[in-house]
Image (tube, rainbow, N blue to C red):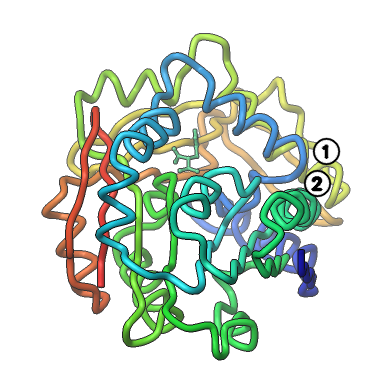
């Protein structure tokens, strides 16, 4: 079970710089990648079990139902690369049918990634597993040395993570995946489809309040890691679907006029001012294919189940 782990520096530095810049901007915003500290990863897992948030369950049902077709469409794959792999659970299904020789997983949350990748290496003794704790959005090229000589590559990007990028940034990321995959590489990607706005609204406003806790945990993380004094009771989780933009927007709205100190700097919030924390774009199949084609990919085939799509690109 060959297993390699490498942590790239500076996740903490970029948190500080991004939070300070985001709080100084108008409107205020913080990138969603910072949701995923240990508590945020646990809360996200719990979101995926909420009755209103079907996205993860639907994707897994789709993958289970169409796995043999997907494997046949993929043919031989020697290396799988999964950016933002998290707990590495989703890739197992592909490993079982494709039996590649190498797996490269990357995630900004290094400790859970290392543990999950080590478990994979144990469960798949013939698989060469490399885990890179890194912000792949910053420097995807850093993965190149681990891919040299790896044969035919598949970039796997499930879970509608692509929805957390605005369309221009999503195109840019898919173009970088194109370079990472190489000329004969492929992309298997899952994304959430446009659907009844009330269903989307409910998915980001679950009755148990788990999505609210996930959103507010960002402030708890900043308090802990950047010596800040956000009062979580004075911010409200606010999420809604915006049909003209085709996205769910998540904000934390200030319930009072207040000042907050973060890393020695002071920021003012007016009553009702919103701190934007996430966009989650929803696409029609044709819209997404056009976006991927702008990034240099060609749609080979696709599958759809209950408002979720998986597409294969070459
Ligand atoms: C990870 N990502 C695809 C999730 C989404 O639906 O945009 C994150 C999330 N935010 C709130 N609930 C789930």
Q: Residue at x 48, y 44 (%)?
A: 278
Q: List the residue tagged with mark 1.
A: 229
Looking at the picture, tell me which residue is in the foreground, 24 or 76. 76
Q: The C terminus appears in which quarter of the rendering? A: bottom left
Q: Residue 38, located in which quarter of the rendered image?
A: top right
Q: In the current view of this chain or complex, which residue is farthest to the top?
A: 207
- Where residue 14 appears, x then y in whole percent? 71, 67
Q: Residue at x 64, y 67 (%)?
A: 135
Looking at the picture, tell me which residue is in the foreground, 42 or 19. 42
- Where residue 164 appears, x then y in whole percent? 43, 50
- Where residue 101 appears, x then y in whole percent? 57, 71
Report how far apart the C-alphas of labels 1 and 2 lie in the structure.
6 Å
Q: List the residue tagged with mark 2.
A: 261
Q: Residue 21, located in which quarter of the rendered image?
A: bottom right
Q: Residue 219, located in which quarter of the rendered image?
A: top right
| SS class, disc 2 | strand
């Amino acid at each position: 079970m060959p297993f390699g782990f490498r942590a790239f520096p500076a996740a903490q530095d970029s948190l500080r710089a991004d939070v300070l810049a985001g709080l100084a901007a108008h409107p205020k915003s913080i990138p969603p990648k910072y949701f995923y500290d240990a508590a945020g990863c646990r809360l996200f897992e719990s979101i995926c079990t909420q009755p209103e948030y079907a996205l993860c369950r639907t994707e897994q049902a789709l993958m289970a139902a169409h796995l043999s077709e997907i494997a046949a469409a993929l043919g031989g794959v020697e290396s799988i690369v999964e950016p933002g792999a998290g707990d590495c659970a989703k890739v197992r299904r592909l490993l079982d049918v494709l039996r590649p020789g190498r797996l490269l997983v990357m995630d900004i949350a290094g400790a859970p990634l290392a543990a999950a990748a080590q478990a994979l290496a144990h469960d798949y003794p013939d698989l060469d597993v490399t885990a890179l704790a890194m912000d792949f959005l910053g420097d995807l090229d850093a993965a190149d040395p681990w891919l040299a000589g790896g044969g035919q590559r598949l970039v796997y990007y499930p879970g509608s993570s692509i929805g957390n990028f605005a369309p221009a940034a999503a195109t840019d990321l898919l173009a970088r995946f194109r370079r990472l995959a190489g000329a004969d590489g492929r992309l298997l990607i899952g994304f959430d489809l446009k659907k009844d706005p009330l269903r989307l609204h409910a998915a980001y406003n679950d009755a148990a309040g788990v999505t609210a806790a996930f959103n507010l945990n960002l402030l708890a993380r900043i308090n802990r890691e950047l010596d800040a004094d956000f009062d979580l009771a004075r911010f409200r989780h606010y999420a809604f679907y915006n049909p003209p933009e085709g996205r769910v927007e998540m904000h934390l709205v200030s319930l009072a006029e207040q000042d907050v100190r973060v890393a020695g700097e002071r920021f003012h919030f007016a009553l009702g001012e919103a701190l934007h924390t996430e966009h989650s774009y929803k696409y029609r199949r044709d819209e997404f294919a056009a976006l991927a084609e702008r990034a240099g990919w060609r749609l080979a085939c696709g599958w759809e189940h209950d408002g979720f799509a998986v597409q294969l690109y070459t």
